[in-house]
Amino acid sequence: MESRHCHRSYFTEILAPFECDAFFPEIGKEFRQVGNDADVAEEVQEENGVRFQYKIYEKKAID
């Protein structure tokens, strides 16, 4: 996400605790959440008892 080529990130937030040892880096202040594309659901989804939500982040414009 630090690359100058990265301007948008499609993120799936898992809404349940899991025992794990790998984590996605914290989304920096240079990104802001934007509305989802028309083909990307905004509401909470559930599959196999696991709730999740899709989110899109874009890099803020530099003034």
Image: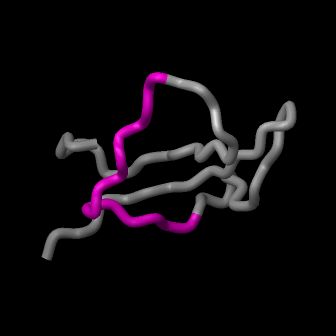
Residue 39: percent from left, percent from top: 69, 53
Hey, which residue is sitting farthest top in the picture?
21
Q: Image point 18% across, 45% down: which residue?
A: 4
Q: Image point 82% across, 44% down: which residue?
A: 46
59 lies left or right of 9 = left
- Pick whichever, 3 or 38, lies toward us: 3
Q: In which quarter of the image is residue 41?
A: bottom right
Hey, which residue is sitting farthest bottom in the picture?
63
Query: Looking at the figure, which quarter contains the N terminus?
Result: top left
Dominant secondary structure (helix, strand or loop) of the stretch shown in magenta: loop
43 lies left or right of 10 = right
Residue 25: percent from left, percent from top: 35, 40
Instruction: Say if the magenta span includes residue 49.
Output: no
Q: In which quarter of the image is residue 28?
A: bottom left
Its colouring scheme is: one colour
| Residue stretch rendered in magenta on the structure | 21-35
23, above or below 8, in the image: above
Residue 13: percent from left, percent from top: 59, 46
User: How many discs appear?
Assistant: 0
18 lies left or right of 24 = right
6, above or below 42, in the image: above
Query: Looking at the figure, which quarter contains the C terminus?
Result: bottom left
- Pick whichever, 24 or 11, lies toward us: 24
41 lies left or right of 59 = right
Residue 18: percent from left, percent from top: 63, 31
Q: Image point 20% across, 40% down: which residue?
A: 3
Hey, which residue is sitting farthest right in the picture?
48
Hey, which residue is sitting farthest left in the picture?
63
Instruction: Say if the magenta span includes residue 34.
Output: yes
